[in-house]
Amino acid sequence: RGREAMLAQLWKRAGAAYRAKVGKELSAHGLMYEDCLIETEEVKLALKRLPPELLNAREQRLKRAMVLSSQIKTLPEEVAAKLDPFESYLGPYLEQVKKEKEEQLKLAK
């Protein structure tokens, strides 16, 4: 039991360190975590449901990140520090798509 608790604590620390590193990298390029999701069927459907201003903001972030990457540059520290890469903009739409898919599967049975 003590060993399991120790391993859980170790995973928690490693996860926090990894999240911080990923967050710093995303912020440096002006990206949000959800900008980098693999575009599965559910993600594509959720993207179609985004309001135009959120979809446009996502596209602008992706374009800016590609330009910065191609120039081997990052955003200025003061700009990157203001960004929260883990703020969700797609999550509610993705959850809705998943719930609808589950309902369709239940109805099909």
Image (cartoon, rainbow, N blue to C red):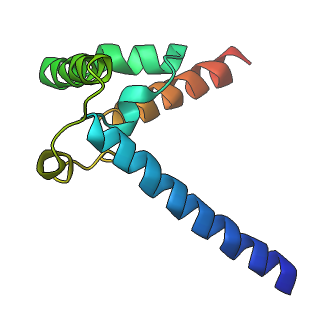
- Residue at image location 52% in from the left, 63% down from the top: 16
Residue 65 seen in this snapshot:
yes
| In front of the other: 24 or 108 | 24
When the figure is inspected, residue 23 is found, relative to residue 52, above or below; the finding is below
The residue furthest front is: 72
Q: Quadrant of the N terminus?
A: bottom right
Q: Residue at x 16, y 18 (%)?
A: 56
29 or 42, nearer to the observer: 29
Residue 61 point in image, percent of width and height: 22, 25
Rendered view: 85 above or below 34? below
Q: Residue furthest bottom?
A: 2
Q: Residue at x 51, y 31 (%)?
A: 99
The C terminus - image quarter:
top right
Count the marks: how many? Answer: 0
Image quadrant in which you'd find residue 93: top left
Question: Hey, which quadrant is residue 30 in on the image?
Answer: top left
Please state if 109 lies on the left or on the right of 84 as rendered.
right
Location of residue 82 in the rendering, given as x and y in whole percent from the top left corner: 16, 52
Quarter assignment of residue 51? top left
Give percent across and percent down for residue 100.
Answer: 50, 25
Which residue appears at 32% of the width and 37% of the height?
32
**79 or 107: which is nearer to us?**
79
Q: Is residue 56 above or below residue 16?
A: above
Q: State the residue in front, 88 or 16.
A: 16
Q: Is residue 1 visible?
A: no
Drawn side of residue 79 relative to residue 37, left or right: left
Residue 63 in the image: x percent, y percent? 23, 16
